[in-house]
Image: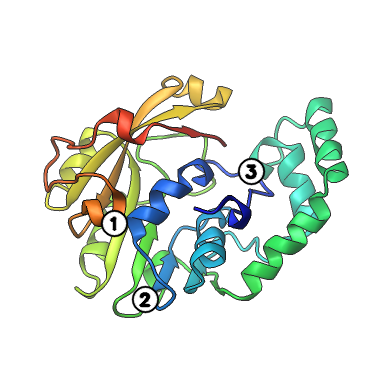
Amino acid sequence: MEDNKRIKPVIRYVGSKYRKLNTLIKLFDLNKNSVFVDLFSGSGIVGVNVHNVVGCKTIINDYDHIFPLTMEYVEKNLTSYMGLGKNKTKLALDYYQTRLRNGLVAKVAQYNQILKSCMILHQDYSQVQIPPNSIVYVDPPYYGIKGLYQHTLDHQLLHNYLKGLDSSIKVVISYNDCEFIRNLYKDWYISKIEVQYSCGTCKRHGGRRKTELIISNWPITPKSTRLQCLKSVNYPLKPSDLLVKQGY
């Protein structure tokens, strides 16, 4: 990805994929004629960068109703734990003031300008009308993780929904690596990546280095990702091939 087109996060969100963008965009294998759907957009960082870098039609499903971003929301988000109104500290307030001095207002305006050229929805994932031949990215709340997410999710229902999509639709899912998810998607193409986390919260949930899954309903080929992927839960990808640093 061209660095001058990469848009950095302006808010914090659990599970941000900013540090995985290069890997993900290669995997999506998009072009200007593609339709990209960010089904669980969170901070919107994936959809915003896809649209800015690739220039394709982008649908962002903002279930939390945070777009367009207001400075009131941004301040709440950056001065408390992920915007949940917890643990506001002097350190967090100082951090916010530093962000303001470094051009935060202009960066939020740029973020919103890109969002204006995307299609923004505020729906439950199951209500989103996905056009045929789309590429759908799914980054749901991870299975079995408590205390980090605002919403709960029935992972079986999500699986059933994705399995029932039109066969022309390509799906890519990010998930934590656990037996339940591996078994749930045993008929899909599964690869694993090693992730190095940078936040203290993640350390409390199992350590700084973890494995995550990339699951797809089509074989990811070297042409699109420069990586090997097999229809197997034996994980063909070497951790060193996809070592990234995950920041929240």
Tag 3: Cα neighbours inside 10 Å, few (<14), some, or many (≥20)? some
Residue labelled with disc 2: 130
Q: Is residue 168 left or right of residue 20?
A: left
Residue labelled with disc 3: 12
Q: Measured along the vertical axis of the image, is residue 114 above or below residue 199? A: below
Instruction: Report x, y in % for residue 152.
Output: 44, 48
Q: Are marks 2 and 1 in contact (CB under 8 Å)?
A: no
Query: Looking at this view, is 126 or 239 the one in front?
Result: 239
Examine the rendering and report whether any part of residue 55 can be seen.
Answer: yes
Q: Is residue 162 left or right of residue 37?
A: left
Q: The C terminus appears in which quarter of the rendering?
A: top right
Q: CA distance from mark 2 to mark 3?
A: 27 Å
Identify the image's colour scheme: rainbow, by chain, secondary structure or one colour. rainbow
Q: Residue at x 53, y 67 (%)?
A: 51
Q: Residue at x 47, y 73 (%)?
A: 56
Residue labelled with disc 1: 224
Helix, strand or loop status at disc 3: loop
Query: Looking at this view, is 53 or 48 the one in front?
Result: 53
Q: CA distance from mark 2 to mark 1?
A: 22 Å
- Determine which quarter of the picture holds residue 182: top left
Instruction: Report x, y in % for residue 53.
Output: 53, 62
Kindly identify the amino acid type of the residue bearing the numbered disc 3.
Answer: Arg
Kindly identify the amino acid type of the residue bearing the numbered disc 2.
Answer: Ile
Tag 1: Cα neighbours inside 10 Å, few (<14), some, or many (≥20)? some
Kindly identify the amino acid type of the residue bearing the numbered disc 1.
Answer: Ser
